[in-house]
Structures are given as structure tokens and as C-alpha cells.
Amino acid sequence: MDQRMREAVRYLGYGKNAVDDQTLRLIAESFERLRSVAGRKSVYRIFDLEQPDAETVRFGSLTVKSRNLGKNLRGCDKIVLFGATLGIGVDQLLSRTSKTDMALTVVLQACAAALLEEYCDACQEEIRAELKAEGRYLRPRFSPGYGDFPMECQKELTQMLDCARRIGLTVTESLMMVPSKSVTAVIGAGTLPVHCHVQGCEACEKTDCIYRRDTL
């Protein structure tokens, strides 16, 4: 089972339990369907970062009060604003499938989440290589809604990234993303060589890391 399959299984909530052959076939079928409709797009911008105290983060025109975000960004002097989407075709596939096959829809949802995570990891690797040339190291992605990082910041991030025009991503008044399989995040960058796992704290076994975000 490759990493993509393992991530889908994780999103389906199997934990350490064995996965039956029928589910594995549905996962493989779902990835194939998603491959044909996904329109992956991403955008990022790099800003200077200020942290006047442990709970205040400033970049661009935005000031955020968040102890968890401040902890994640400790020691950074730059911040990467990042947005990514799998596109509206995935939403349309999920909508069609939900009318005829709910079991497949559940698997499609899990596979789409895994596909988005894989794409974000690949984008972050490109950003990591760019900033490494400047002598900077990345922290894990940190999205609005993690810990006490306000979900309302999704709107500001999408506006600062011009997501609507550049990748077709918008945020509704109720803070839902359209397309739904999308993400916004910030990524700290600093000269301190902290080699955080690209997939973030959920995938890292170093539970005593000072940069580890709280249980989400």
C-alpha cells in the first residue's frame, strides 16, 4: 500500500485495523475518478514577519492574536501565505456520486482529502527548496482553525493571495471554502535549522518538540 492509499485509509478512520479488499478496491477506483477531474492549483506569497509578543503575529496588513500560531512561528522572520485547491470538478463529482452511491461518496471524500494533502506537500517542497537557497528553513503548515488561530482569518488570507482570481478559490460568509477541497495555510520560515516534518505535527513522532502545535 503506497502513501496515498495509507492516507486515504487514515481519513476513513481505520486506525490500525485491517482494511477489507472491497474498500481497497473502492479507494483505488476513487483515486482514478479523482485523477480525471481534479484541477490542482496553488498560490503563495512571502511576507516579512513580526512577533512583538508571544501571542501577536503581524504580516502584510494583518495582525493575528494566537498563542498557538505564535508558538509555531517562533524564531521565524518570514511567513509564507499558501492556498491550494483541487478545483470545482471534484465537488461536482462528489455531488453526482452522493445521489447514487453513498458508500463510494465517503471513500471519495477521504481520497480527495488525501490527494489535497499530497499536493500541498509537493508545493511545500518546492517552497522549501526556494527558501533553502536563502538559508531559511520551513515550519509545518498551519491553517486557520488550528488551535486558537481564528477561522475568520481564512478570508484575509484568500484576499491577500488574490485566490479568487488566481486559483478560483473563495470563502463564503459562513467560512466554507469553494471549491470545498481547498486549503489555506501559513508556513513560517527562519534561519534556525529546525527540520520539521513537512506533513506537520500529526505525522511527527517528536512529541517534545517546542514547535509542536497543540492537539487539534
Image: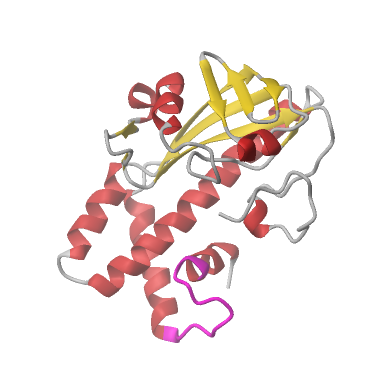
Q: Position of residue 1 (x, y in %)?
A: 58, 73
* Front residue (pair 207, 16): 207
Q: Nearer the viewer, residue 152 or 172?
A: 152
Identity of the residue drawn at 70% across and 30% down? 54
Q: Is residue 103 left or right of residue 122?
A: left
Q: Between residues 107 and 143, which one lies in front from this camera angle?
A: 143
Residue 7 belongs to magenta span: no
- The residue drawn where x is 60% and y is 19% is 58
Q: Main secondary structure of the magenta part?
A: loop
Quarter occupied by residue 153 = top left
Q: Is residue 113 above or below residue 20?
A: above
Residue 100 at x, y = what percent? Answer: 16, 69
Q: Give yes or no for residue 16 being in the magenta stretch.
A: yes
- What stretch of residues is rendered in magenta? 10-21
Looking at the image, residue 8 lies above or below residue 95: below
Image height of 75 relative to 144, above or below: above
Of all residues, the one furthest to the right in this rendering is 193
Where residue 47 appears, as percent x and y from the top left, is 61, 18
Horizontal and vertical percent for residue 196?
Answer: 74, 46
